[in-house]
């Protein structure tokens, strides 16, 4: 039964990836995003990415958009864990695996659309999704030892998603320089402080330390890559190798590592907070 769930998700993933590639070659020259509002407010060179704009294709930024499948893979992995967790008696996986998994899938779609269409709808969805993921990590860190109900968590999370959607109505390149980095930094600081507070009372296990370290390391490599790409210091516009795509993959690895870091914490079991597994 469990292997069936895994095969289903792998097949959906491969089908989506293949469909995007086929559609891209079919639609090349047909400008499928023609009627969408630009994310740069008509500013030339407003997009802070190195990759060449294939302006009449489905995948306007080819490597950048395809690398967003890394986020989908992470989201699918969490959903598989959520479904498999439901079948075990011990835990329900509702918040950490299911809501986190759905948020990661939503972000994958938003980020893909952003790089595929270079349109404002995609840009907003990308921003909202990215912030949703980081808010999840900070918020989950803050409440994971509190006995909050799944329904309440979902409600707050949805309301927060709506607020993020409202404030994401900003255009390139301004958004990339200011709001994005500010909010992201604040949320990461909240997460680190919150974890530091949790860990005061008990020692961190080797497993947790490994995942936290991997998460931090891939985030740092990703941020450096993304910055080099945005500043166009290291930039081959027509190459399949794009540093912004490296950022996507590193960010996805980082989200996955923090997910495993949370799952490695078993101290809640004694406190009977099963829904947070
Ligand atoms: Zn991106």
Image (cartoon, rainbow, N blue to C red):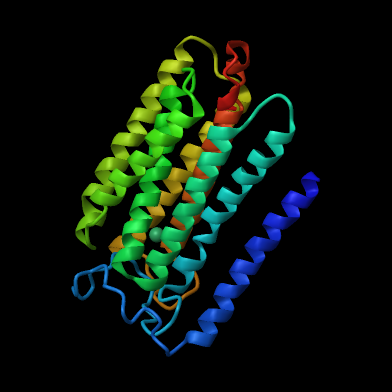
* Whether residue 186 can be seen here: yes
The quadrant of the image that shows the N terminus is top right
Residue 199 lies, with reference to residue 256, above or below; the image says above
Residue at position x 63%, y 47% from top? 77
Residue 66 lies, with reference to residue 35, above or below; the image says above
Residue at position x 45%, y 35% from top? 154
* Whether residue 233 can be seen here: no
Q: Which of 239 and 248 is in front in this view?
A: 248
* Image location (x, y in percent) of residue 25: 53, 84
Residue at position x 67%, y 55% from top? 9
Looking at the rendered structure, the number of numbered marks drawn on it comes to 0
* Image location (x, y in percent) of residue 256: 55, 42
Quarter occupied by residue 42: bottom left
* Image location (x, y in percent) of residue 122: 36, 64
On the rendering, which quadrant does ligand 1 occupy?
A: bottom left
Q: Nearer the viewer, residue 190 or 209?
A: 190
Residue at position x 35%, y 69% from top? 50
* Image location (x, y in percent) of residue 143: 43, 23
Residue 85 lies, with reference to residue 17, above or below; the image says above
């Amino acid at each position: 039964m469990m292997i069936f769930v895994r095969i289903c998700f792998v097949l959906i993933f491969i089908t989506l990836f293949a469909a995007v590639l086929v559609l891209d070659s079919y639609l090349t020259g047909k400008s499928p995003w023609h009627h969408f509002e630009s994310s740069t407010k008509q500013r030339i060179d407003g997009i802070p990415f190195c990759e060449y704009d294939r302006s009449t294709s489905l995948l306007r930024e080819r490597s950048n958009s395809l690398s967003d499948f890394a986020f989908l893979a992470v989201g699918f992995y969490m959903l598989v864990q959520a479904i498999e967790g439901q079948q075990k008696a011990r835990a329900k996986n509702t918040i950490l695996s299911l809501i986190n998994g759905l948020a990661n899938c939503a972000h994958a779609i938003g980020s893909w659309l952003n790089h595929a269409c270079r349109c404002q709808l995609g840009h907003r969805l990308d921003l909202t999704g990215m912030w949703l993921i980081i808010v999840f990590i900070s918020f989950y860190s803050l409440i994971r030892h509190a006995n909050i109900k799944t329904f309440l968590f979902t409600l707050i999370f949805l309301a927060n998603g709506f607020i993020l959607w409202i404030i994401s109505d900003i255009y390139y390149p301004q958004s990339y320089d200011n709001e994005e980095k500010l909010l992201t930094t604040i949320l990461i600081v909240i997460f680190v402080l919150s974890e530091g507070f949790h860990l005061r009372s008990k020692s961190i296990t080797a497993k947790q330390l490994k995942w936290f370290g991997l998460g931090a390391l891939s985030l740092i490599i990703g941020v450096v890559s993304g910055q080099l790409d945005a500043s166009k210091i290291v930039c081959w516009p027509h190459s399949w190798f794009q540093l912004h795509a490296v950022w996507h993959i590193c960010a996805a690895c980082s989200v996955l590592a923090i997910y495993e870091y949370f799952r490695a914490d078993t101290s809640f079991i004694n406190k009977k907070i099963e829904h947070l597994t």
